[in-house]
Amino acid sequence: MKITTSMLTVATIILWMVILLFSVTAVYSVMNVGVNIGEAQMLPTSSGIKFSLPFSIDNNGYYEIADLNLRTRVTDPDGQVLDLTETLVDSIPQGKTVNESHTIKVDLDDILAMDHLIFMLNDHKFTVEIFADLNFARAIPVQLSTNVSLPWGAPFADFSIGALSVSQHNSSHVEAVMPVSFENHAVIDITGTLKMEAYNNSDQHIASGVTDINAVSNQNFGDNILLYVRVQDESKLADGGKLHILFETHLFTVDWWEHYG
């Protein structure tokens, strides 16, 4: 069969029309993809906290969406990466909607390992960068991106040390009462022990005390720590100094220094 120039011309025109039609419908399909990010929920885990981020994809275009890869990158206010997570969806047929949930886990030990004590004492917001990679008709790769903020509730928010009061305990020691309080803004209960070590301004150890803590999520906690000090060291305690504060729980151990007096 002899193929003429006119036949090649017609075939070429048809081919370009198909390519043009596919391109137009593909662009239309991309523009008609609905991506909805829901409100994140904070939930407790065995090692810390997880954020459950619901999302839905509406495929209102002409072609199947394939190989959806939703990736998130969580960063602190300084831009340091705290977590990288991905969720995969194999296929979203044309005209269908998929509803999924993307889970972001934050281990308290990891935060402390990165020297993020500030997150244990102060509420913050983490920035979450969301990237969605997908394919239309398994031929056209597309990437979508957006940012959201995740609230972070500090386990020991507004930590405070009250006024020290001293009374006679026995002939050799006085009893010093150190009030402490904080608000547990985390979604997990904090149980463990709180230890305090008192040092004077010359870094001499004066006394130690410990108390059990059971701080319910989103509740205030207050207690007194009793320090027993030798009578001859009472003036050193009253002059003020430093406190070494140590929280120990089954999830983490955290310590820092506070001035008193």
Image (spheres, rainbow, N blue to C red):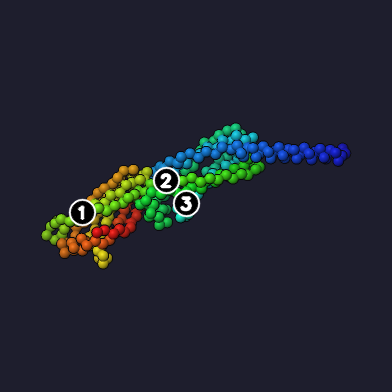
| Percent x, y of residue 21 | 71, 37
All told, the count of numbered labels is 3
Residue at the spot 31% in from the left edge and 53% down from the top edge: 247
Q: Is residue 188 left or right of residue 22?
A: left
Choose between 26 and 240: the one closer to the eye: 240
Of pointers 1 and 2, the one earlier in the residue sequence: 2
Give the residue pinned by disc 2: 151
| Percent x, y of residue 29 | 63, 37
Give the CA separation, mark 3 to mark 1: 41 Å
Q: Is residue 254 left or right of residue 197?
A: right
Which residue appears farthest toward the top when viewing the image?
Answer: 95
Question: Label 3 neighbourhood size at 10 Å, few (<14), some (14-19), many (20+)?
Answer: some
Q: Secondary structure at mark 3?
A: strand
Residue at the spot 50% in from the left edge and 49% down from the top edge: 73
Give the residue pinned by disc 1: 177
Question: Label 1 neighbourhood size at 10 Å, few (<14), some (14-19), many (20+)?
Answer: some
Give the residue pinned by disc 3: 75
The numbered disc on residue 236 is none
Q: Secondary structure at mark 2?
A: strand
Screen quadrant of the C terminus: bottom left
Screen quadrant of the N terminus: top right
Of pointers 2 and 3, the one earlier in the residue sequence: 3
Choose between 5 and 162: the one closer to the eye: 162
- The amino acid pointed to by label 1 is Val
Of pointers 3 and 1, the one earlier in the residue sequence: 3
Q: Is residue 46 left or right of residue 220?
A: right
Would you identify the image quadrant in which residue 196 lies? bottom left
Question: Label 2 neighbourhood size at 10 Å, few (<14), some (14-19), many (20+)?
Answer: some
| Percent x, y of residue 177 | 20, 54
| Percent x, y of residue 100 | 51, 38
Residue at the spot 39% in from the left edge and 43% down from the top edge: 44
